[in-house]
Image (spheres, helix red, strand yellow):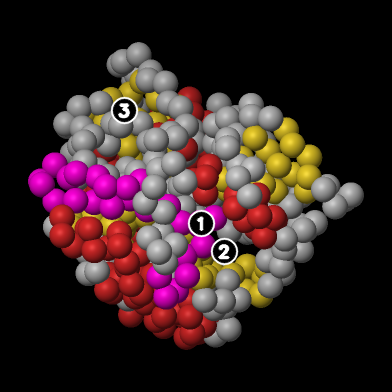
Amino acid sequence: MRREVPDSCPGVLRLHQAADGPLARVRVPGGRLEPGQMQALAAAAAELGDGNIELTSRGNAQLRQVRDAGELTRRLEAAGLLPSHTHERVRNIVASPLAGRVGGYSDVHPLVSALDAGLRAAARLAELPGRVLFTLDDGRGDISGLGGDIGVHAVGGTEFALVLAGQDSGIRVSGTDAVQVMLAAAHGFLELGSGQWRLREVDEGVAGVIEYLGLSPSAAPLEFGAAHDLPIGWLEQDNGLVALGAGVRLGSLPARLAEFLAAVDRPIVLTPWRGLVLADLAEGVAEQVVRVLAPMGLLFDATSPWLLVSACAGRPGCAKSLTDVRADVAVAVESGEVTTRQHWSGCERHCGRPRGAVTEVTATTGGSYRVDRAH
């Protein structure tokens, strides 16, 4: 499959002209934010945007209605959130949010930093499409099922399966070699491709990358599925501290709430399920965080119906949407109508649809919604 036009994924330096104004996407490799970086995003959202930080399905952050692109660039550079102008849109790296803290075979977060540095150091990799996704799964299976292009999946403390186009290639690599193999696979994608946005779009792309790498499968491939057991609530870390997993309603985090998160002064991990993990808390601090931030809207209850529903941008953010989808979702949730996994869309494109079985609720020109049961 050949794409006739380059991908149009936005960044900080190339904004998307949404119906409600310019939209900036900030890449956050591995979803990891320091408190000061969260504070910088909160201030930018409040002072330069619409007052919210949108969390994406790749653990990134978006700001809508950006009023001063130059000032946003300056602030994000100062916060360390824009370390490269040439490679900013290709830093799409998701990793198991709880790696190194709760379970898993291996802490993959050091690999995130090494992979990000390797991407930025290779001039040609700036040519990667902004849609290409790198995945690092600590073995629990939460990330490899997201359908990434190039990734690794821990099968032991120091051994990883090489994941290509969302499937286990059968190739096994050491932790020492994992980053270099992923970078080499990215070069292979560029060599093989002819304008495609994703590895799965390249004819015989996986086989071609394997040949380019000069590696051979040595194990039966693992099967990956969509993860539904999201990190929500009180999570005991392996070192005796506490992590708090929180859902965010439709992935829209108000700037004021983000400021409170930053004030806790602990590491924050954005998850690819449009939520976050606040890590390394003492029990007393964790209890206080829940008491303060739950009433402000963070979801610490794994049974909340808000965790069952996702939605596209809808009106006024998207000109193609037939209705204000998010307002309709809120009515459905608050009235108790949402009891199964649902994705609401303002048109037939179904933007933002999560992977796995989900009921599709699609706006129609008649002013109502069509419901297609989970499949």
The quarter of the image holding the C terminus is top right
In this figure, what is the number of numbered marks? 3
Is residue 30 visible in the rendered image? The answer is no
Nearest-to-viewer mark from 3 and 1: 1
Q: Secondary structure at mark 3?
A: strand
At x 28%, y 52%, the residue is 244
Which label belongs to residue 10?
A: 2
Q: Give the camera-side residue of 350 and 192.
A: 350
Question: Which residue in the rendered view is the most extreme toward the left?
Answer: 239
Residue 141 is inside the magenta segment: no
Q: Which residues are magenta?
A: 232-257
The residue under label 1 is 249
Task: Name the amino acid, label 2.
Answer: Pro
Instruction: Specify whether 288 is left or right of 308.
Output: left
What's the distance in space between the residues labelled 2 and 3, CA to CA?
Answer: 31 Å
Q: Considering depth in this image, is 145 or 328 the residue closer to the camera?
A: 328
The disc at residue 161 is: 3
Q: Is residue 10 visible?
A: yes
- For image coordinates 35% across by 14% down, the residue present is 220
Q: Position of residue 4 (x, y in %)?
A: 71, 49
Mark closer to the chain start, 1 or 2: 2
